[in-house]
Image (cartoon, rainbow, N blue to C red):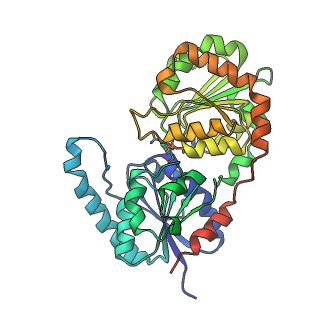
Amino acid sequence: MKQQTIILTGGGTAGHVSLNQAILPSLLELGYDVHYIGSEQGIEKELIGEAFPDVPFYGIASGKLRRYFSMKNFTDPFKVLAGMMQAFRIIKKVKPQVVFSKGGFVSVPVVMAAKLAGVPVVIHESDVTPGLANKIALPFASHVFTIFEETLKHLPQEKATCTGSIIRPELFEGERARGLAFCGFSTLKPVLLVMGGSLGSVVLNEALRKNLPELLKQFHIIHLCGKGNFDQSLEAMPGYKQFEYVTTELPDLLHAADFIVSRAGSNSIFEFLALHKPMLLVPLSAQKSRGDQILNANLFKKQGYAEVLQEDELTKESFMKSVHTLTERKVEMVETMAKTQKPKTPDEMASLILRYKK
Ligand SMILES: CC(=O)N[C@H]1[C@@H](OP(=O)(O)OP(=O)(O)OC[C@H]2O[C@@H](n3ccc(=O)[nH]c3=O)[C@H](O)[C@@H]2O)O[C@H](CO)[C@@H](O)[C@@H]1O
């Protein structure tokens, strides 16, 4: 029988890799030969390489597509073109029956090359409104899957389906006791986990660190601060544990957390929802992004899953006040989250994607 092959792409931030990480074991289990195309510098190389060392990873040239002026706007289109030629050669060699794209700029040349090679493309959008890379990819795609129902309003009806979130199964397998032991914490205080998305957030880090003495009276704190944001001077602070980025430890740390303060990247917030973690969201401001996190956060607030503090209202004082409100709303939030439907499994998602193979 002909070998069944699929190419996965997506990267730049962990949010553009996590669904690929989730479905990869299902595809391998089904006997698929899985290949990954990402960018050489992106986080995807490390994440996929670490968790799936047998999956061939191809790093291609990737140019950022910007909505604002930059000198790089003159050179990056050439990188996209170079990436497209590289992706085309890989596709011709590997001969996949389908390409699945989780978005991010590196996915654009891959999607275009797949179309050129006559290979069906399926894409996935995890934010409320489609990102630029997915908007460009859309005309080349046979189908697009979304997490939010609201996203369907922004997509052609005939080729879009909402599946809800897909959560990496290992996140359900964490253990609170292991998480506490890993941080050297007792069970005496509730645990507050602060996470600035996969890249870390300088403003969240600052707001947290300014309030540390006050917060440590009440909580043990786990801080996922992002690469390059580790503060050596706080290393010995009792009850405060910083990590730049965690992989295998994340499930235990999430299970150890009683409360979460976070950016509002869609993958993270759906993971917290699936684990019924009361959350305070500080979405990335509209000045620094297309405002997707604000929409994600506001929808979560409306559904009763989250407290929201907008970045332009973030101060030392408002941070403390919002954390206080979060603790007061814990029971009500957990009850609301417990009523939500269980997410689809990675096996189900993989089989939905495979419907579009040639
Ligand atoms: C700055 C930026 O462009 N942010 C975008 C990016 O965020 P970002 O990459 O932060 O995306 P998400 O919050 O969606 O996902 C982060 C993923 O990283 C994982 N994780 C995080 C920290 C850690 O230490 N270990 C770890 O494994 C989380 O469990 C999660 O699966 O993609 C999201 C999904 O399209 C968007 O909503 C965000 O607006």
Measured as percent of width and height from the top left, residue 115 is found at 38, 73
Q: Is residue 115 left or right of residue 243?
A: left
The vertical placement of 32 against 154, above or below, is below
Quarter occupied by residue 51: bottom right
Residue 117 seen: yes
- The structure residue drawn at horizontal position 19% and vertical position 49%, both measured from the top left corner, is 74
- The structure residue drawn at horizontal position 73% and vertical position 42%, both measured from the top left corner, is 275
Q: Is residue 101 left or right of residue 163?
A: left
Q: Is residue 108 left or right of residue 201?
A: left
The image shows a total of numbered marks equal to 0
Furthest toward the bottom, the residue is: 1
Q: Is residue 315 left or right of residue 254?
A: left
Residue 28 seen: no
The vertical placement of 298 against 329, above or below, is below
Closer-to-camera residue (135/181)? 135
Position of the N terminus, as image quadrant, is: bottom right
Measured as percent of width and height from the top left, residue 194 is found at 60, 29
- The structure residue drawn at horizontal position 70% and vertical position 12%, both measured from the top left corner, is 217
The vertical placement of 164 against 158, above or below, is above
- The structure residue drawn at horizontal position 64% and vertical position 45%, both measured from the top left corner, is 270
Measured as percent of width and height from the top left, residue 103 is found at 45, 56
Measured as percent of width and height from the top left, residue 171 is found at 69, 47
